[in-house]
Amino acid sequence: MTFLSKPREGQGPGEVAVTCDRVTKSFGKGSALVTAVRGVSVEFNTGQLVMLVGPSGCGKTTLLSVISGVLDADEGDAALFGVPWKSLSRDKKARRRGELVGFVFQQFNLLAPLTAAENVAVPLLLRGMAFSEAVERSVEALKQVGLGERATALPRQLSGGMQQRVAIARAIVSKPRLLVCDEPTANLDAKTGQSAMELIHQASRTTDDQGRDRCVIVVTHDNRVFHYADRIEQMEDGRLKAAPEDFVLQEARAHH
Ligand SMILES: Nc1ncnc2c1ncn2[C@@H]1O[C@H](COP(=O)(O)OP(=O)(O)OP(=O)(O)O)[C@@H](O)[C@H]1O
Ligand SMILES: [Mg+2]
């Protein structure tokens, strides 16, 4: 299996962050077999916000899960910065995921008894950082999403939009090189959805401690946020459609 290490022409700036090489993933058996992703090959670069769009059930979440090392592909593989997930043991895979990938979901998934800062600190604590330093870094991340004043609030004391901003802070606090967001604005109204996307877009323009760019992938149905994309990939029945993104992007920008 070969993984390209250099960006191809016409893919915009950055280095190759994600490589999918003929990724196929099915669920179930026999007559209940569902093939969610069918032989997807694609590369995504750093410094880019890629949107993955398509109808419900077309395989977006499954593809995102394979890319981020949450699910193993049945056939083919995904690689992150040139390292194929299947080449790693279970422990190494979990560690690499913790170091390299930040996640934002439709549900904010905050822990109810923990303050905003403590929620943001969870990924740092899991990586063994001392509590006081983790909370300090978390307050910084909360400032970045405009919630510096609410660091000690509990999730139930925050609006949905604020809770999603806490979740975004939690996803970026460890400075991941890949940020994956699955329907991040689906539970938000238009205005809070825009401000959440604004932050996610900002993440695609921000580097880590060593000045390295990150790649951001956003799955969305929300055409109000399409204009934040540098690149749009349309998925249908487990496959990516060939090069439709220019048209979709132009439409999105024209209407904004
Ligand atoms: N854990 C699972 N077990 C069984 N089938 C699954 C599982 N996860 C996904 N599927 C099936 O795989 C197909 C693709 O699902 P997936 O969740 O990737 O779609 P999606 O594009 O993210 O849809 P949505 O927009 O509704 O979130 C669907 O038919 C789904 O029912
Ligand atoms: Mg989904």
Image (spheres, rainbow, N blue to C red):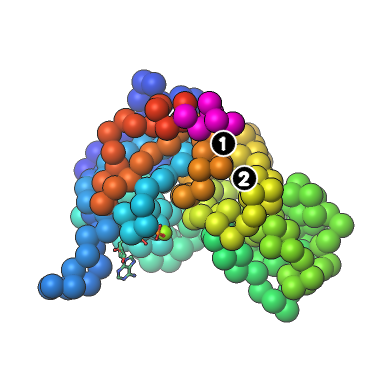
Crowding around mark 2 (Cα neighbors within 10 Å: few <14, some 14 to 19, many 20+) is many
Secondary structure of residue under mark 1: helix
Question: Which residue lies at the image location 59% right of the left edge and 31% below the top edge?
Answer: 256
Question: Which residue lies at the image location 33% right of the left edge and 45% below the top edge?
Answer: 235
Q: Earlier in the sequence, mark 1 or mark 2?
A: 2
Residue 166 is situated, as x and y percent measured from the top left of the image, at: 70, 59
Question: Which residue lies at the image location 18% right of the left edge and 68% below the top edge?
Answer: 33
Q: Is residue 251 above or below residue 84?
A: above
Question: Would you name the residue on which mark 2 appears?
Answer: 197
Can you tell me which quadrant of the image ligand 2 is in? bottom left
- Name which quarter of the figure residue 28 lies in: bottom left
Q: Which residues are magenta?
A: 251-256
- Residue 247 covered by magenta stretch: no
Question: Which residue lies at the image location 56% right of the left edge and 42% below the top edge?
Answer: 224
Secondary structure of residue under mark 2: helix
Q: Are marks 1 and 2 in contact (CB under 8 Å)?
A: yes
Task: Say which of 182 and 116 sits in front.
Answer: 182
Crowding around mark 1 (Cα neighbors within 10 Å: few <14, some 14 to 19, many 20+) is many
Secondary structure character of the magenta stretch overall:
helix
Q: Is residue 240 above or below residue 69?
A: above
Q: Is residue 216 left or right of residue 246?
A: right
Residue 248 is situated, as x and y percent measured from the top left of the image, at: 42, 32
Q: Which mark is residue 228?
A: 1
Task: Say which of 174 and 36 sits in front.
Answer: 36
Residue 86 is situated, as x and y percent measured from the top left of the image, at: 31, 56
Given the current orientation, which residue lies at the most extreme front position? 255
